[in-house]
């Protein structure tokens, strides 16, 4: 998969000053057209203002990729993992008013792609974030470390100046 990401970055996104952050090999469910290898890509612009976009990229020939459709991440309304209890590769996206029924090549690939979508929508779209339905939401919980200072019981003159000091160190995984 890393080779595909590298090829996509070089062939399609580098010229537009974009960086690919997630890729999933998909098949559209319910289309009657001939199924060509298709990738759904999440890309971020490298210039300010930063914009996050979704692309459907098709593999036309051996090393020829073409962007077929593009959407801003803020246009994604719903990301539906279909069934959180079953380990399935299918998922749905509602972009604008259109429903996209997709099937990733594996459940792991689907989960990794949705996790990156959640991460970047939380970072760049705090108000317009899509609804994530039937997917395990990654929760980053901070680790809290508490440090307490001790004072000798014998030194009463130190008790007047004694203040409890707590230091919180927040580390994110």
Image (cartoon, rainbow, N blue to C red):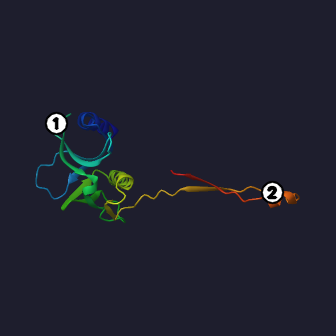
Depicted 108 relative to depicted 130: above or below: above
Q: Image check: 31 left or right of 7?
A: left
Q: Quadrant of residue 152?
A: bottom right
Q: Residues within 10 Å of mark 1 (few under 14, many from 20)?
A: few
Depicted 86 relative to depicted 27: above or below: below
Which-is-in-front pick, marks 1 and 2?
2
Which residue, given by chain and number where applicable, does mark 1 sit on? 61
The residue drawn where x is 31% and y is 52% is 106
Give SS at disc 1. loop
The residue drawn where x is 43% and y is 57% is 138
Q: Image check: 160 left or right of 168?
A: right
Image marks 1 and 2: residues in contact by CB distance under 8 Å: no
Q: Image check: 106 left or right of 154?
A: left
The residue drawn where x is 18% and y is 62% is 97
Indicate the quadrant containing the N terminus: top left, top right, bottom left or bottom right.
top left
Question: Percent from the top left, x then y, of residue 59?
Answer: 19, 40
Q: Quadrant of residue 50?
A: top left
The Cα–Cα distance between marks 1 and 2, rounded to whole angstroms, is: 74 Å
Give SS at disc 2. loop
Q: Residues within 10 Å of mark 2 (few under 14, many from 20)?
A: few
Question: Percent from the top left, x then y, of residue 162?
Answer: 77, 59
Question: Percent from the top left, x then y, of residue 60?
Answer: 16, 39
Q: Nearer the viewer, residue 135 or 96?
A: 96
Question: Percent from the top left, x then y, of residue 126?
Answer: 37, 58
Depicted 65 relative to depicted 138: above or below: above
Which of the numbered marks, if any, corresponds to residue 148? none
Which residue, given by chain and number where applicable, does mark 2 sit on? 151
Q: Nearer the viewer, residue 54 or 1?
A: 54
Q: Earlier in the sequence, mark 1 or mark 2?
A: 1
Q: Quadrant of residue 9?
A: top left
């Amino acid at each position: 998969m890393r080779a595909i990401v590298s090829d996509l970055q070089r062939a399609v996104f580098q010229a537009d000053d974009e960086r690919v952050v997630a890729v999933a090999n998909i098949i559209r469910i319910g289309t009657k057209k001939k199924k060509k290898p298709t990738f759904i890509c999440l890309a971020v612009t490298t210039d300010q203002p930063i914009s996050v976009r979704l692309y459907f990229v098709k593999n036309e020939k051996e090393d020829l990729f073409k962007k077929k459709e593009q959407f801003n991440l803020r246009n994604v309304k719903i990301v539906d993992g279909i069934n959180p209890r079953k380990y399935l590769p299918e998922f749905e996206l509602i972009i604008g008013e259109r429903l996209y029924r997709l099937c990733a090549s594996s459940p792991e690939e689907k989960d990794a792609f949705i996790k990156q979508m959640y991460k970047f929508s939380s970072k760049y779209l705090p108000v317009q974030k899509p609804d994530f339905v039937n997917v395990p939401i990654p929760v980053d919980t901070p680790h809290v470390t508490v440090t307490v200072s001790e004072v000798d019981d014998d030194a009463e003159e130190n008790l007047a100046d004694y203040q409890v000091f707590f230091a919180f160190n927040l580390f994110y995984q």
